[in-house]
Image (tube, helix red, strand yellow):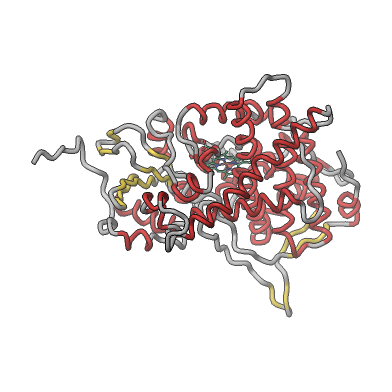
Amino acid sequence: VNIKKNPAPYPPGPRGWPLIDNILDMPRIKPWLTFTEWGQKYGDITHIEVLGRHMFVLNSSKTALEMMDSKSTLYSDRPVVPMAGELVGWKDSMAFLPYGDSFRQQRKNLHRVIGSRAAVNVYNVVEEVETRRFLKRVLAKPDQLQEHVRHTAGAIILRISHGYEVKENNDPFVDLANCVLANVSQATAPGAFMVDILPFLAKVPAWFPGASFKRISRKWRETLEEMVSAPHKSVKDRMADGAAPMSFTSNLLEGRDMSAEEDHAVKWSAFSLYSGGSDTTVSAIYSLFLAMTLFPDVQKKAQAEIDAVVGPDRLPTFTDRDSLPYTDALVKEVLRWSVITPTGFLHCVTEDDIHDGYYIPKGSFVMPNIWFMLNDSRTYANPSQFNPERFLAKDGKDPETEPRTMCFGFGRRICPGIHLAEASIWISTVMSLAVFDISKVVENGIEITPNVEPSPGTISHPKPFKCSIKPRSATALGLIEQEANY
Ligand code: HEM
């Protein structure tokens, strides 16, 4: 027999993973901690093999950049996901698209409209108006913080993607979108669907015993199609009447003759804003409130800075952004400390590579352990400490590495929503701290300290926690109660 020899050895890694049992055993609770242990044991690249598929877990940002950024032509594909991608139909959405023409076309759309801080400035008014509405909702029902964060993130994105203004309650698009996102997170949960492990099952007819995933996927597919098409059609109808407010979609459609293919790309890239941008931003802003509950000294420092620069008579706006370095550092520290996408999104390798003397075969998956990179003591002093000052130059010491170089992923797949994400988190932080004091709740005379307990999943959220949110003063109350309209 002629066995083809590998051109180089695989990187080291734990044994005993090839069995199907082990896939179902994949660490589901804080998997990033298991991956971190592997890094400590095996080095910056760990190799595992699951049913003949090679996977590489990366435990340093340097290695992640050397592979996925410097060699991005080899490392920019995505895995094929039978359940969520093929059967439910997410394969046309940006995050799932294979590296190729549709991918490039959608990235171009996103880049054109939200690809720089200057481009995103156009939407500052949307961010400000919706965040002021957020303050009002928090004031009215502080114990429903997480719902308000979610509602506001949805409102901002739908306004930007389609010029759509959401209703205060039971908005049909927000409900539909939440349903679509809940479905995809169920569809992609590791081990949830056998079809992802045995892709030939996709060809089994729906009546076949055990093929309930086919009926489920058909239902989820209809919901997804409605969510992608309905807002797109509504923009077109309003443009025909000359009544469409400015948005991502109207901007791309305006004055251009669209082929069916281009129209499809606009439709799906607008949807990608929602799918990529809502849940992630929600996690970040909810984490900010958790951090402020836990670290009152940081909160006071940021408030002192805001008070000195903005004064008591108005709410902060984006024009204050460059004058608030501590608050800016606080936002960076939230992006480092909170676990938003702990293990990133898988990249798939399109050509054989040899990296650092190790064999990385075509078709294998690469997973950056972003949680560890943001907690790596080679990059961050006392990484478990919440300390915005690490991002300020001081006494001749340079600021530590910006989390944005890791927390948004790598190479040609790097998050295209960075500028929008940073704008949303920044305005929520500065407006909330200008008017609210966030603190631990006291129940029966006992102060409750929330646990820091991130959920598992591609997009992780802090476990729901209690905190007290009160207006800082009568003046602050007055600012919150002012009308916020377009
Ligand atoms: C704090 C907030 C956010 C975080 C932490 C985050 C993080 C990430 C990460 C880690 C990836 C994967 C990159 C890779 O594969 O290497 C990603 C992809 C993506 N993000 Fe974000 N993101 C955030 C906000 C947003 C926003 C606001 C939008 C849209 C407006 C967005 C849209 C997307 C899209 C469309 C992709 C897929 C890109 C592709 O596959 O080429 N994200 N994001």
Look at the picture and state if 285 lies above or below 256: below
Q: Quadrant of the C terminus?
A: top right
- In x, y percent, where is residue 230? 70, 41
Visible in this render: residue 395?
yes
> Can you name the residue that lies furthest to the left here?
1
- In x, y percent, where is residue 66? 39, 33
Look at the picture and state if 430 lies above or below 238: below
Q: Quadrant of residue 159?
A: top right
Look at the picture and state if 332 lies above or below 38: above
Looking at the image, which residue is at 74% across and 31% down? 236
Tally of marks: 0
- In x, y percent, where is residue 474? 90, 56
Q: Which is more toward the observer, 98 or 399? A: 98
Q: Which is more toward the observer, 403 or 57? A: 57
Answer with left or right where residue 139 lies relative to residue 329. Answer: right
Q: Quadrant of residue 419?
A: top right
Answer with left or right where residue 270 lies relative to residue 369. Answer: right
Q: Which is more toward the observer, 404 or 299? A: 404
Looking at the image, which residue is at 68% across and 27% down? 119
Q: Quadrant of the N terminus?
A: top left
Visible in this render: residue 397?
no
Q: Quadrant of ligand 1?
A: top right
- In x, y percent, where is residue 386? 58, 54
Looking at the image, which residue is at 39% across and 39% down? 348
